[in-house]
């Protein structure tokens, strides 16, 4: 069945096109252009009226933890995890993302290979949800960030890291996560602690790239950030202390910044509910993170949307709120929209995503208001289409 969205304001992933039309055939976009020049096939298609509405590509969240639900006690949630509980939480998280207009997620650390396996179930049509790219378990040093919550494997040394990368890929990982510094949600280690050595990072990155996998580096401290960038990672996650030298290196090498603003906000805005050690660390880097984000934007570092959803008071489906925060911190609405569409797709090496163009995946979101004029409109999707099927909201 063909579907035609008529006379709509279209953000195609890169620019805004007024009075546009989009023809969907099966699970792909067949045509996009001026509504006045719609092809004959549009007349026979099921029409979705677009007047006064805005159509965008499905949103992409490049940093989630699907097996966590965003409660105040991250460690407590981890202690209750089993393989079965993880799968149930992942399925619920996928539904919440889809309802928010998020049609692709990248899971950067979960319970074993659960997210990888559920992602395959989505691909086969057995579970409804966004498409899932998943890292399996993150890789951290012995005693490093994440070792206490069961979503990271402790591994040291270049040879061991190469083996760990291979083992995660064997288990289904479609991307690799390296923990290059300390973090906020691990007690007993400072957020800016530099973890892996240059040799260790380079070994893991070269191994992952040889298998065609991208590499995301959790990195907060400036030294760890620069070390990860020079080792060739594809993205810096959080990047709360990106220095001028770090930003320049990221710009030169094409390294993406996934700032996860919602993760910090969820903690500092709930000081009486989140463990005190995490609140103290988040408060210490909050202003630095704002400066680092603005530095990345000024320097021309490519930004991709990622929420770190699943961390305290950071629920799944939070990508629209992340984009609102990006605008509050200095991005234009158009820049923020690109971060969750075409730029995010570039980071994931998925050119069929994040754009509305012939041959692209028919993952689309329809809004009653224009998010370029009012970014808050992103928090109120009217309809969500996943691979050509309207899965959320009314279709007419």
Image (spheres, rainbow, N blue to C red):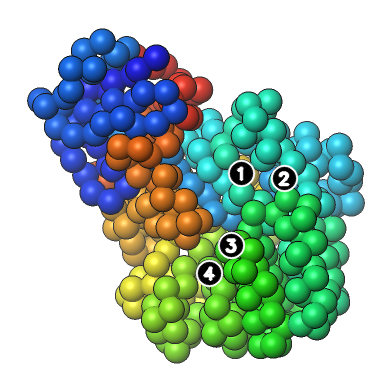
Q: Earlier in the sequence, mark 4 or mark 3?
A: 3
Q: Secondary structure at mark 1?
A: strand
Residue where numbered disc 4 is placed: 234
User: Does 239 appear above or below 84?
Assistant: below
Q: Say which residue appears at 14% left-offset and 32% top-offset.
A: 34
| Residue 84 seen | yes
Mark 4, mark 3: which one is toward the viewer?
Answer: 3
Q: CA distance from mark 1 to mark 4?
A: 18 Å
**Secondary element at tag 2:** helix
Q: Secondary structure at mark 3?
A: loop
Q: Is residue 110 visible?
A: no
Label 1 to label 2: alpha-carbon separation: 8 Å
10 Å crowding of disc 4: few (<14), some (14-19), many (20+): many
Decide: marks 1, 2 in contact (CB < 8 A)?
yes
- Of the numbered discs 2 and 3, the one sitting upstream in the chain is 2
* Residue 106 x %, y %: 59, 51
What's the CA distance linking mark 2 and mark 3? 19 Å
The residue identified by callout 1 is: 132
Label 1 or label 4, whichever comes before in sequence order: 1
Between discs 4 and 2, the one toward the N terminus: 2
Label 3 to label 1, Cα distance in Å?
17 Å
Residue 212 circle label: 3
Provide the secondary structure element on which disc 4 rests. Answer: loop
User: Which of disc 2 and disc 1 is earlier in sequence?
Assistant: 2
Identify the image quadrant of residue 278.
bottom right
Q: Percent x, y for residue 258?
A: 51, 63
Residue where numbered disc 2 is placed = 115
Give the position of the N terminus as an image quadrant.
top left
Q: Nearer the viewer, residue 27 or 56?
A: 27
């Amino acid at each position: 069945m063909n579907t035609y969205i008529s006379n709509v304001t279209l953000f195609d992933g890169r620019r805004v096109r007024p009075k546009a039309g989009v023809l969907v055939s099966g699970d792909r976009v067949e045509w996009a252009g001026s509504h006045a020049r719609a092809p004959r096939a549009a007349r026979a298609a099921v029409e979705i009226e677009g007047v006064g509405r805005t159509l965008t590509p499905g949103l992409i969240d490049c940093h989630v933890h699907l097996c966590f639900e965003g409660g105040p006690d991250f460690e407590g949630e981890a202690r209750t995890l089993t393989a079965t509980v993880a799968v149930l939480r992942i399925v619920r998280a996928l539904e919440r993302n889809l309802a928010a207009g998020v049609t692709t997620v990248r899971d950067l650390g979960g319970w074993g290979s659960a997210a990888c396996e559920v992602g395959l179930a989505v691909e086969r049509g057995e579970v409804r949800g966004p498409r899932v790219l998943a890292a399996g378990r993150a890789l951290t040093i012995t005693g490093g960030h994440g070792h206490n919550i069961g979503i990271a494997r402790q591994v040291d040394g270049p040879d061991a890291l190469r083996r760990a990368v291979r083992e995660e890929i064997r288990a289904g990982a479609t991307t690799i996560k390296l923990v290059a510094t300390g973090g906020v949600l691990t007690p007993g280690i400072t957020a800016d602690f530099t973890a892996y050595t240059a040799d260790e990072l380079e070994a893991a990155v070269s191994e992952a790239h040889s298998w065609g996998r991208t590499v995301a580096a959790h990195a907060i401290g400036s030294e760890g950030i620069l070390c990860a960038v020079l080792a060739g990672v594809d993205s810096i996650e959080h990047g709360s202390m990106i220095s001028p030298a770090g930003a320049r290196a990221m710009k030169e090498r094409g390294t993406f910044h996934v700032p996860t603003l919602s993760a910090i906000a969820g903690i500092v805005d709930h000081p009486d509910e989140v463990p005190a050690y995490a609140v103290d660390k988040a408060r210490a880097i909050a202003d630095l993170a704002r400066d680092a984000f603005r530095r990345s934007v000024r320097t021309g570092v490519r930004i991709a949307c990622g929420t770190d959803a699943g961390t305290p008071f950071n629920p799944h489906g939070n990508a629209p709120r992340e984009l609102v925060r990006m605008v509050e911190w200095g991005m234009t609405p158009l820049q923020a929209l690109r971060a969750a569409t075409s730029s995010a797709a570039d980071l994931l090496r998925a050119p069929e995503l994040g754009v509305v163009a012939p041959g692209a995946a028919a993952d689309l979101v329809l809004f009653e208001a224009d998010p370029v004029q009012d970014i808050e409109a992103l928090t109120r999707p009217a309809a969500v289409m996943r691979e050509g099927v309207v899965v959320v909201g009314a279709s007419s």
